[in-house]
Image: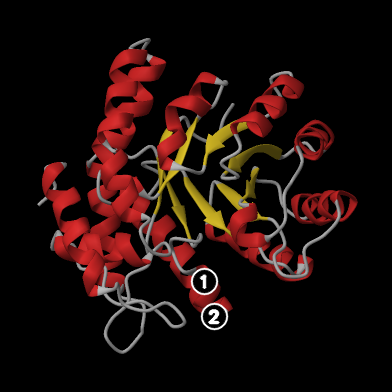
Amino acid sequence: MAVFTGAGVAIVTPFQENGDVDYGKFAELVEFQVKNGTDAIIVCGTTGEASTLTHEEHLDVIKFCVEKVAGRVPVVAGTGSNCTQTAVYLSKEAEKAGADAVLLVTPYYNKATQKGLYGHFKTIADSIRIPVILYNVPGRTGCNILPETVVKLCTEVENIVGVKEASGNISQVAKLMALADGKVDLYSGNDDQIVPLLSLGGKGVISVLSNVAPKETHEICAKFFAGDVAGSCALQLKALDLYSALFCEVNPIPVKKALNLMGMGAGTLRMPLSDMDEANVPKLEKALKDFGLV
């Protein structure tokens, strides 16, 4: 059984002006997501600025999220690292905190061969009992998990269940699903490719867009699964301008700005991320307005 089906939000981590995690605002964002139909919450991922959290903060944010969600939707904790033992530690602690699954990004900077990736992910998965979703985003990591490696991991390691595919390479994803034989739960990692990946057998999306439009992103998936492919596609296309605005700078710079423009209080960014260029703000404001969010 899949960890979740539908649209899971890659939730932001709000910060106060002094840089501390704003747990009050985080609780509000969690409630907003649950009340507006999100199908899962993915905490401490790329969008959650996990790379600039200390290990203590990282685990505190996961624990807080699990407590606030209180079993209403699955919580998937980002626990990946380019150090295998660090990822083991974070994954074991996330499991203790009550996370329903973990999301493991490929090693970045030091990268790895396909053999190294297999050993890295298997070692982490073997250290825990909860499900593991792999995360392939070569544009950020410089490291691509090949379809054969994903299928081998999902076939040979019991609790590795699927992959968040953000390569943007539809041909690669098609090859993956042709090899998968039903053993790989596929999630789109790109909001502009939800319908294409659902059409290849995907279970849903791990979404940046859901931060600002959880109902609509959920509906893209729900309509597809209900057989209304045309309706799903229409929503996907309607969101393209907003998607473009949300990625006009490095994620999560624009989505945090969008939440602030919506009065949601996502707060500041941690360095090395910087505030959104003022020249890009009008485009984002227009996209939010056109989508009916402000």
- Is label 1 in a helix, a strand or a loop? helix
Picture layout, residue 92 above or below residue 237:
below
Considering depth in this image, is 256 or 42 the residue closer to the camera? 256
Q: Position of residue 286 (x, y in %)?
A: 14, 52
Is residue 221 toward the left or the right of residue 58 in the image? left
**Label 1–label 2 contact, CB within 8 A:** yes
Q: Position of residue 124 (x, y in %)?
A: 76, 56
Considering depth in this image, is 119 or 108 the residue closer to the camera? 108
Few, some or many C-alpha atoms within 10 Å of disc 2 (few <14, some 14-19, many ≥20)?
A: few
- Is label 2 in a helix, a strand or a loop? loop
* Image quadrant containing the N terminus: top right
Give the distance between the C-alpha atoms of the residues marked 1 and 2, in whole angstroms: 6 Å
What residue would you read off at disc 2? Answer: 54
Picture layout, residue 46 above or below residue 40:
below
Report the disc number at residue 58. Answer: 1
Q: From this viewpoint, is residue 220 visible?
A: yes
- Name which residue type carries label 2: Thr
